[in-house]
Amino acid sequence: MITTTLLFFPLVIGILLFFLKGENVKKIALGASLVQLVLGVTAFVQFDKKQVLAQYVTNIPWIKGMGINFHVGMDGISLILVLLTTLLMPFIIMVANRNTYKNPSTLYALMMLMQFGLIGVFTSQDAFLFYIFWEIALLPIYFIALLWGGADRIRITFKFFIYTLAGSLLMLAALIYLYLQTPLPHNFSLQALYDLQLTEGTQNWVFWMLFFAFAIKMPIFPFHSWLADTYTDAPTPGTMLLSGVMSKMGVYGALKILLPIVPMGVNDNAHIAITLAVIGVIYASLLAMFQKDYKRLIAYSSAAHVGLIAAGVFSMTYNGISGAVVQMFAHGISAVGLFYVVDILVNRTNTRQLNELGGIRSVAPVYATSFMIIMMASIALPLTSGFIGEFLLLVGVYEYNGWLAGFAGLSTILGAVYMLKSYQVSILGDKSTVSDKFFDLVWQEKVILFPLIVLIFVMGVYPKPLLDVITPAVKNLFTIMEVTIK
Amino acid sequence: MKALLLISGLGILGIVSEILNFKKYIYKLTIVGLILTLGITFLEWDNPTPLQFSNMVNFDNLSISFIAVLVLTAILWFLSSAPIFDDSEHIADKTTLILFALVGAVCMVSYNNVTMLFIGIEILSICMYVMAGSKKGDLASNESSMKYFLMGAFATGFLLMGIAFIYGATATFDIAEIKMYMENSPEHLELVYTGITLLVIGLSFKISAVPFHFWAPDVYDGAPIQVTSLMSTIVKTAAIAAFYKLFTVSFASQSIAWECTLSYIAGITIILGNLIAVFQSSAKRMLAYSGISHAGYLLLAILANNASGGNALVYYTLAYSVATIAAFAIITLVLNAKGDTNFSSFEGLGKKNPLLALATIISMLSLAGIPPFAGFFGKYYLFTSYLENHGIGLVVVALIGSAISIYYYFRLIVTMFKGESEEVIPMNGTVKLVLILCILFTVALGIFPDLMSGGW
């Protein structure tokens, strides 16, 4: 029941918001997202950690003739991502409230629909439903980027849409093929697909069709070319949705569809996937080092982190996969935080160029400290949220291959380099023309940043509640795969 | 069967209205009559009246569903085309022609005898030739009518020749008897195969599949826009339904003679139709080419050669017709306000015309086959029915085609949000009603596809 409420409440609010006008929409959207947060936390607290199968399940027939059910529920991995989505949504809406957008009601409505799509993706227990939500989630973010994006938005959003949709079409073809392999009467439930006994050859080509869809969404090198433009050009709430939550869709798809359905295919091709992921990590880190545009820098750093998460997933080790789930949560928080501090910077100085900034710390110490803490979480300093996930990921990749782990480990060092360098250039240093105009955080900004900082520390010091939920789900994943833990 | 009689009756009423001078009411009477027909068609569901008129027509559930699709499309079309019934002294003529075209379409989806198929096609085509040239002063309209007529006559030749060959082999026009003949080791295979090939060519002309499509863009572009809308919905639905019935009933057991040819036709139609649509600068021409590519998708249902192919066809034609009617209604509005249908005329219209923008977005998404809208499920049903007894090859081609089509459908959406236009497009109540109905149908069919896909 709680899953269905989580799913349809934002849809109802979203449709309602389309027809409303004026300032009320901001309050309604924020209120709705807080209700969602309460529901998400309730689901988290009441979750039975001993049970490995999906909980809070609703299963009713949807398209009877085709064996398609409206089947939603949450296992540990789903729950973490639902919690992340509901947790980030109020922050994203508060950030949107800080800026003025034309046609606000449409913007908030689209954000609510986006939440509907995302929660749908994370809770579907039916492959067809998963595909439908996968596409539904794409539409609102496309229109958010198209309607409120920067100057070059038309071309950029187009590329983004065509790219991701081409990937999903491959996934659709693969899913229909899998569906037709299920025993009569065919059905689309994930469990039925897990039970399939496919030959190794079939698993291999199904792997590639699914892999393209997920690799484009994450994105993994060399399918990343839509990312930097889209992240930079989208309005800040859109960027937060993209990097905070949507980039997790690809990883989640890999965990929920790719690994359990075609384990042999993954096993045969993991070396390619993981190598691409590690190349992507280093490539994105290097690009980030040479960026002059702050938002673009954060976009590349986000790509580097998601690349490492993908490497962890394809390592097919217990540590790698647990680390991936933990890091998805941690990265969501730090990415939203980072994009917000940069947004504050851009709004006050009207520039995103690093070399035009400087000397901000002396006029805005609270801001500078908050920035520092969020950055530390992003570069995975111990006792911040980023550490535990990154550590587990590197252990996982190491268990797969020491050399690859070495290269992947470079990303933490490179991450520290580009983050600290950019911080030094933009925030520290002597007073400048920019810093004269700058003022410290106002209370509305503190309301957004301080809870994020608290979350960063809480998760860094005491990650146990998260791990407790994740562990059984990951173990269950391995039972399904029946691949011995290396 | 009542639908056929009712629509014919309405057509005759149209002629009478001219004589008895009540033609100003005929437009409203027609709409009421069609709504009535739709209701009666629903009542005939599962209560079929098979084999009427010396086995000439057969109203089984599949025919009834197609009739419902046709009549529903006709209602939406009449509502959206109110302007062409406003001004001229030819109200009664036009209404009558369209109604008889609809009669032809109903014959084409319910025939049980190949002569009936031929008569249906001719009734439909002759009305459409006249309608294509109905803008008498316009050179393009005249050209369109002439081309349509010449090409149509050409295709009819192939069709008739094919029917003659089949008759030569089987000595019957009855599709059930032809089916029996085909299943029991036919003797004159050379006649049968020649006949089937000629029929493939003739019917491919009618549904404008590549390489028999050359007439379509010019005809669609030149004809008055409302007539183009009619051609790409009702005419296409009727032609593909007739195609499906003939080949999956009569020639199902001889699929060796046509499967390969038709597969290639389908594949080329999908790819070429989509590719050429990408390069169009006018929205009307873009829809014409996209209509060609949709004919390619529809051929998959015939290739599937099974019952679920028929279900998929009903669903797809409905989803496609509704979205196309909406798209043409939008283009008509823009044409009236701006004077042309080029993409540049759509710039910035999305900002101040929320209903127009929403209708464009939803109809384009549906045509592009993006969930959760009706068009997606149409494609999905087609693909699964085809995959039931075929390999994945042609479906991959179709998916590539879909990916290409996203480009030009989205181009229209994107254009609507480009630039800084503040223009408000005037819309009257009927058009608003049509757009809202089309949006509701497209969304509802997408969320509850079971509404349509119940077994028959």
Image (cartoon, grey):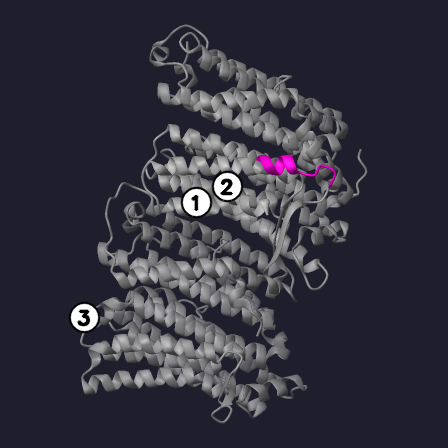
Q: Is residue A162 visible?
A: no
Range of the magenta residues?
Answer: A41-51
Q: Is residue A431 magenta?
A: no
Q: Position of residue A466 (x, y in %)?
A: 66, 30
Q: Position of residue A302 (x, y in %)?
A: 55, 28
- Residues at badges 3 and 2 in contact (C-beta under 8 Å)? no
Where does label 1 land, which residue?
A14
State the mark number for residue B87.
Answer: 3
- Residues at badges 1 and 2 in contact (C-beta under 8 Å)? yes
Q: Is residue A135 visible?
A: yes
Task: Tell which of B305 and B144 is nearer to you.
Answer: B305
Distance between mark 3 and mark 1 Cα atoms: 43 Å
SS for dot 1: helix
**Amino acid at circle 3:** Asp
**Amino acid at circle 2:** Gln
- Residues at badges 3 and 1 in contact (C-beta under 8 Å)? no
Distance between mark 3 and mark 2 Cα atoms: 50 Å
Looking at the rendered image, the disc whose residue lies closer to the viewer, 3 or 2, is: 2
SS for dot 3: loop
Where does label 2 land, which residue?
A115
Q: Quadrant of residue A50?
A: top right
Distance between mark 1 and mark 2 Cα atoms: 9 Å
Q: Quadrant of residue A27?
A: top left
**Depicted B65 relative to depicted A361: above or below:** below
